[in-house]
Amino acid sequence: MVIDEPTPSGWKSWIERAGSGLVGIAELANPILVKETRQALKSRQFIVTFLVVLIACWIASFAVVAIVGPDVYFVAAGAQMLLVYAVILAFPLMIIVPYTAFRSLAAEQEDNTYDLLSITTLTTGQIVAGKLASAIVQMLVFLSAVSPCIAFTFLLRGVDALTVAVLIGYLVLTSLGLSIIALLAGTVAKVRYSQVMVSVLLVLLLAGVFFMSIPMMQEFISDSYSFLRDGRFWVGNLAFLTFYLTTFALLHAAASAQIAFNSQNRSTPLRRIMLLQQACFLGWMTVPVITDGLRIVNDVLFVAAMMSGIYWYIMGTLLTSEWPHLSRRVQRSLPQSQIGRTFFTWLNPGPGTGFMFCVANLSMLVAAGLIVMLSTSSPAARLLNSEQIFFFYTIGWSYLVLYLGLGKLLISLMRRFVFVSLTAGFLLHVILLLIGCGGPQILSYLTSSIQFGNQYTLLHITNPIWTLMKLIDTGPATIEAWTVLLVIGSAAVIVMLLNIRAVAVEIQYQRSNLPARVAEDEALLHPEPEPGPSNPWEAEI
């Protein structure tokens, strides 16, 4: 006799399904998250910080109420109390949590335990994500501790829920951004002496951000009524969020690339994010023109050119400092089709493709900016005229191509004799720019008086900062713009031609096939599923 098992009731069945779902989520959780969270929550530093935050909130609650006195029933003191709680919460979120994330990754380098992580099935992205998720868990613990105190500010009047939500959102985003910066710093510091220097610089950065945030929080809380009801405020926040997310993805990819094996493709994901970030930036730069009209188009073009030039110079110094040789593993991931090789070759790793990647993006920006300037010409008054914009775009492009190309040639020459790392290549670019800016200035002081040394002449033609600033301030005539464009533009074209040989070598890399032994191992590790029925009539009964 078979006894049927009782069918569970509705709520019991729902609890069982929820429990099985939570078990599945726990199994999918990053093991780095479990390890780091367990270590962080049991550490003395976390316990002391947590107790200090609780005691500070308790003292602040009594202190503010005592200072206000009997008027607490009539005076709206919620804004002052919210500021105090926000400062208390900002301290662990902006200093403790990011520095803990930095130490968690730097300790892997100190204790030589990262080698054990690298041989597991976890990817470098999962390792960085696990460290970041541990920082998020600590952040949530601090938020849960201070949130009852923040709720107390509603009883004191003077604040609303939207102000509190936006303020906490700012604190969380700032903490996440500082945490990913700290993780990137932890991947850079690979030896003990560099870890000390990076640690000191990171602490100064975190402390500076914390102290700078206090007056910003005070201004936001005091003027939150006008801020939250202004449409420009929300548009600006949306633009900032776009920039924040793309930069966050770029920093995460950079941290993952730093701890990856040298044989992996560490450059292509970064270049894709750079393209995405540039597209988002150009899209948001059209918003002021749409809202304020064509009268500010030249000013928008100037801001876009200045920010894009700084961005691509920094990215270019890093891309042109990459190692020129591609491993077999990287060659197996290269584009294979003719269309892929035509459009995606500049995404391949290498200093030559990195140089042309930056030049192509800069050329596209210059062409688009000049087309917009010519097609939207208007007699309305502007701060900058079309002639200044034209020379700013063309001379700026020439300077960037010239200095990036010279830096790449210098790095390639030095690599024939010594090993030049990515950091060393970046420093060589910076030194080259400093020589171009400071050399003519020193020479002018030696050959003339100080009064005439402070005047701009063609001797300072190698100084891009002073030349472009002088162009914007006083116009093209004061710097002899056509002469500067002819000299710098010709030098940029010559330098670009000198780099063509190295670029041609890198673009000739062909996609290599997977070795037979590796293909057999992959087939054993990931066997193909057995073919099933293609229609209901083929199903076995």
Image (tube, rainbow, N blue to C red):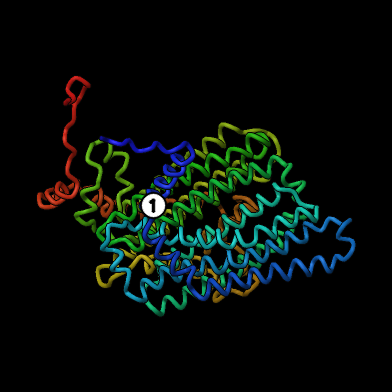
Task: Find the residue positioned furthest to the front.
Answer: 1
Estimate the x, y position of residue 12 in percent, counting from the top left.
Answer: 46, 41
Residue at 57 percent of width and 41 percent of height: 284
Q: Is residue 324 visible?
A: yes
Q: Name the one closer to the observer, 362 or 393.
A: 362
User: Which residue appears at 61% of the width and 38% of the height?
Assistant: 287
Looking at the rendered image, the quarter that the C terminus falls into is top left
Residue indicated by mark 1: 270
Count of number-bearing discs: 1
Determine the residue located farthest toward the bottom in the rendered image. 193
Q: Nearer the viewer, residue 458 or 369?
A: 369
Which of 279 and 7 lies nearest the eye of the viewer? 7
**Up-down relation of residue 348 to residue 6 (above or below):** below
Seen as rendered, the residue at the extreme left is 516
Residue 206, image x, y percentages: 57, 68
In the rendered image, residue 10, in percent from the top left (x then y), is placed at 47, 36
Quarter of the image with the N terminus in it: top left
Q: Is residue 163 left or right of residue 458?
A: right
Q: Left or right? Give the position of 158 relative to 475.
A: right
**Residue drawn at x 34%, y 63% as measured from the top left:** 259
Inspect the image, locate mark 1, and give the three-letter code of the amino acid beneath it.
Leu
> In terms of image quadrants, where is residue 174?
bottom right
Considering only vertical position in the picture, is 346 above or below 80? Answer: above
Q: Of residues 54 and 3, which is closer to you in this image?
A: 3
Is residue 443 visible in the rendered structure shown here? Answer: no
Within 10 angstroms of label 1, few (less than 14), some, or many (20 or more) residues? Answer: many
Relative to 400, is 539 on the left or the right?
Answer: left
Label 1 secondary element: helix
Query: How far across and how far down the image is residue 538, in percent?
Result: 17, 22
